[in-house]
Image: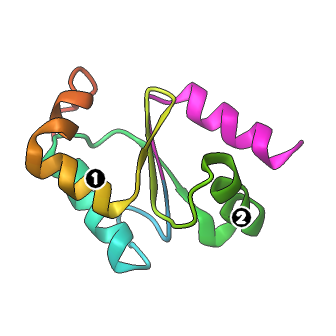
Amino acid sequence: MDVLHVIKEQIAANPVVLYMKGTPQFPQCGFSAVTVQILRACGVSGFLSVNVLENPEIRSGIKEYANWPTIPQLYVRGEFVGGCDIMREMYEDGELQKLLEGLVDPI
């Protein structure tokens, strides 16, 4: 199956998807760690995380899919939100919390 098709299916099937280096329990870069902390601070615990270090095709494919050169990448309700810096700014402005409304799981 084509990697872009796999990515499209992952994003369509899950309300919150984070492509990151490592896992939420063991992030493998500082930016990925920050994105997980931001999601948790927003009350989101149930999300699909995709460890791009385990699959080089996904790692390069996600950059092509979003036309965005860096990882981590956050998708909410099928839409690309951005990376770590954008998430941080949106969180500080309260925008990310509004975007994630209705997707919050009790932690």
Q: What residue is shown at x 33% (from left), y 78% (from top)?
A: 30
Q: Residue 46: x, y in percent? A: 34, 39
* Picture mark count: 2
Residue at which label 2 appears: 60
Q: Which amino acid does label 1 sit on?
A: Met
Q: How is the image coloured?
A: rainbow
Verify CB contact (< 8 Å) between mark 2 and mark 1. Answer: no
Looking at the picture, does residue 31 appear above or below residue 9?
below
- 2 or 1: tag closer to the N-terminus: 2
Residue at which label 1 appears: 87
> What span is colored magenta in the figure?
1-18
Q: Residue 27: x, y in percent? A: 39, 72
Residue 92 seen in the current view? yes
For label 2, count other residues whose C-alpha is less than 10 Å away and answer few (under 14), some (14-19) or many (20+): some
For label 1, count other residues whose C-alpha is less than 10 Å away and answer few (under 14), some (14-19) or many (20+): many
Left of 55 or right of it: where is 105? left
Check residue 82 for magenta coloring: no
Looking at the picture, does residue 93 appear above or below residue 95?
below
- How would you classify the magenta stretch by its main secondary structure? helix
Q: In the structure shown, which secondary structural element does the residue marked by tag 1 occupy?
A: helix
Q: What residue is shown at x 68% (from left), y 42% (from top)?
A: 7
Q: Residue 65: x, y in percent? A: 67, 47
Q: What residue is shown at x 62% (from left), y 37% (from top)?
A: 10
List the single residue furthest toward the bottom: 29
Q: Residue 96: x, y in percent? A: 21, 39
Q: What residue type is labelled 2?
A: Ser
